[in-house]
Image: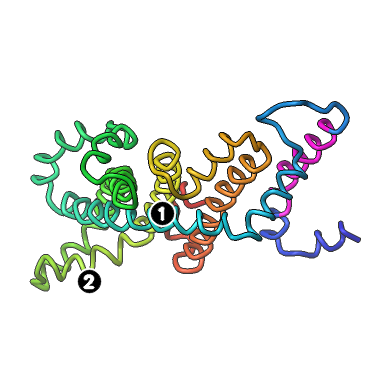
């Protein structure tokens, strides 16, 4: 019967179910192996114990609180760094002269790891949201700049020529021609930057900022609670997957095949 239901379901639903076969199978195998040959370790726990710890952390609200802290810092950094990167990327895409003059500075700063700025940010901002927003904002600024630059350069030249023929101002050309034409690619850039922002936010919390999911992960490790540590780790993975899946669904609904850039499929 299960096979018949699967066969009758839409193709994308069948693919979604098949994608879960490998991780669920791996968890089942790990559960069976650890029950057959128990291991005394501060880093290993039964998958069933991890699920139980996850449900408990969700029920008592501690995991939700940590999640909101991480999301708030992540979205703050994404808005600050992503918006600035978008503006500079559009500017570079519309002006080859500006792009050429700014290329050296971009290439000098872009290789800097965002987490390497944590000591400097701590001196300037101290602990808290401002520290994390700054680090996350730096981490997404350059990817958004480069991807938006490429998106604007991909706008057909004939559309830009129409704007010149209509004698539109630069602001009007950006608003009425450039952004609508580049929007599918910019949405893909947003998806990629959200993934980067989540990783950097959790890393910053582990390294220096006592809040959010990263600090919850570190606290569980220091408390020698491997089931809770792995539960928080799994929750971070599920959170990233959920954010990407939601944005991917919106991308397919709004743009269809227009955002065919490899990263969107």
- Residue 29 forms part of the magenta stretch: yes
Q: Residue at x 76, y 64 (%)?
A: 9
**Is 21 on the left or on the right of 209, as rendered?**
right
Span shown in magenta: 17-34
Which residue is labeled 1 in the image? 188
Q: Position of residue 97 (x, y in %)?
A: 8, 45
Is mark 1 in CB contact (under 8 Å) with mark 2? no
Q: How is the image coloured?
A: rainbow
Q: Residue at x 57, y 54 (%)?
A: 63
**Is 21 on the left or on the right of 218, as rendered?**
right
Which residue is labeled 2 in the image? 176
Mark 1 vs mark 2, CA separation in Å:
20 Å
Q: Position of residue 219 (x, y in %)?
A: 54, 40
Q: Residue at x 71, y 64 (%)?
A: 10
| Circle 1 crowding by C-alpha within 10 Å: few under 14, some 14–19, many from 20 | many
Q: Position of residue 89 (x, y in %)?
A: 22, 51
Residue toward you, 16 or 94: 16
Residue toward you, 263 or 54: 54
In this picture, is 58 found above or below 105?
Answer: below
**Is 204 on the left or on the right of 141, as rendered?**
right
Identify the image quadrant of residue 23.
top right
């Amino acid at each position: 019967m299960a096979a018949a239901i699967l066969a009758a379901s839409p193709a994308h639903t069948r693919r979604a179910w098949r994608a879960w076969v490998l991780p669920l199978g791996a968890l089942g195998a790990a559960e069976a192996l650890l029950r057959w040959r128990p291991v005394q370790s501060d880093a290993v726990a039964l998958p069933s114990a991890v699920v139980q710890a996850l449900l408990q952390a969700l029920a008592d609200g501690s995991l939700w609180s940590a999640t909101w802290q991480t999301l708030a810092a992540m979205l703050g950094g994404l808005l600050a760094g992503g918006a600035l990167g978008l503006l500079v990327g559009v500017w570079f895409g519309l002006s080859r002269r500006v792009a050429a003059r700014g290329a050296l500075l971009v290439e000098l700063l872009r290789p800097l790891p965002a987490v390497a700025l944590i000591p400097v940010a701590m001196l300037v901002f101290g602990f808290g949201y401002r520290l994390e927003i700054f680090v996350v904002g730096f981490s997404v600024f350059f990817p958004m700049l480069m991807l938006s630059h490429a998106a604007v350069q991909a706008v057909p030249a004939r559309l830009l020529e129409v704007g010149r023929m209509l004698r539109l101002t630069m602001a009007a050309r950006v608003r009425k021609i450039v952004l609508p034409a580049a929007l599918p690619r910019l949405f893909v850039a947003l998806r990629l930057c959200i993934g980067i922002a989540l990783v950097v936010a959790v890393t910053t919390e582990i390294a220096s900022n006592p809040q959010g999911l990263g600090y919850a992960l570190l606290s569980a490790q220091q408390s020698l609670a491997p089931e809770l540590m792995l539960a928080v780790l799994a929750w971070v993975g599920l959170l990233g997957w959920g954010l990407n899946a939601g944005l991917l669904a919106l991308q397919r609904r709004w743009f269809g095949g227009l955002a065919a850039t490899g990263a969107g499929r």
